[in-house]
Image (cartoon, rainbow, N blue to C red):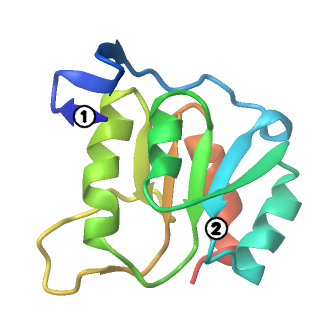
Amino acid sequence: YSAAIGSGAWREEGGKRDRLHVSTTTDRAALHVGVSRHHLSDRLRACLDAAQVALRIPLGASIKHMRVAAGELDAVINLSSGELEWDTCAPEIVVREAGGAYTDGDGKPFRYNQRDLEHHRGSVASNGSCHADLITLLGPYLP
């Protein structure tokens, strides 16, 4: 997976290079949401139950975000207050260049190279089409 600002997002596999595009799903009941395989909190479970999303898919590390960029997932939600900037900086550009959105749980863009490296309000990577709805939903569940 690779991306550069203004150049799109790409996946290279077996010598073939394909441009990545996010999905266009907006209906919560049809969303496929990636979650951490190791850090699925009770808060996130409750949030996803309330959202009534179609499918939760537990995956490891940054592969979840690459699946959003490839249109294979509609969103990734992390409600951990301990996520660090190096967990989001590379996936963010890939998701954004594929047409998606990536913000903290309040919908604010990340600011990198700050003294405090933690993202205290969780993170949401999405296809962009469902982003505002997910941000609204997250409010009561944020750390």
Disc ID at residue 79: none
**Residue in the image at 45% along x and 21% along y:** 21
The image shows residue 26 at horizontal and vertical percentages of 70, 30
Tell me the quadrant of the picture where the C terminus can be found: bottom right
Mark 1 Cα-neighbour bin, 10 Å: few <14, some 14–19, many ≥20: some
Q: Is residue 63 above or below residue 16?
A: below
Q: Is residue 120 above or below residue 105?
A: below
On screen, residue 97 versus residue 140, left or right, reads left
The one of 124 and 13 positioned closer to us in this rendering: 13
On screen, residue 2 versus residue 125, left or right, reads left
Q: Disc 2 on helix, strand or loop? A: loop
Task: Write down the residue under mark 2.
Answer: 37
Task: Write down the residue under mark 1.
Answer: 2
The image shows residue 94 at horizontal and vertical percentages of 32, 38
**Residue in the image at 57% along x and 52% along y:** 76
The one of 86 and 24 positioned closer to us in this rendering: 86
Q: Disc 1 on helix, strand or loop? A: strand
**Residue in the image at 32% along x and 56% along y:** 109
**What amino acid does circle 2 point to?**
Arg
On screen, residue 93 versus residue 67, left or right, reads left
The one of 15 and 127 positioned closer to us in this rendering: 15
**What amino acid does circle 1 point to?**
Ser
Q: Is residue 114 above or below residue 13?
A: below
Q: Is residue 138 above or below residue 135?
A: below
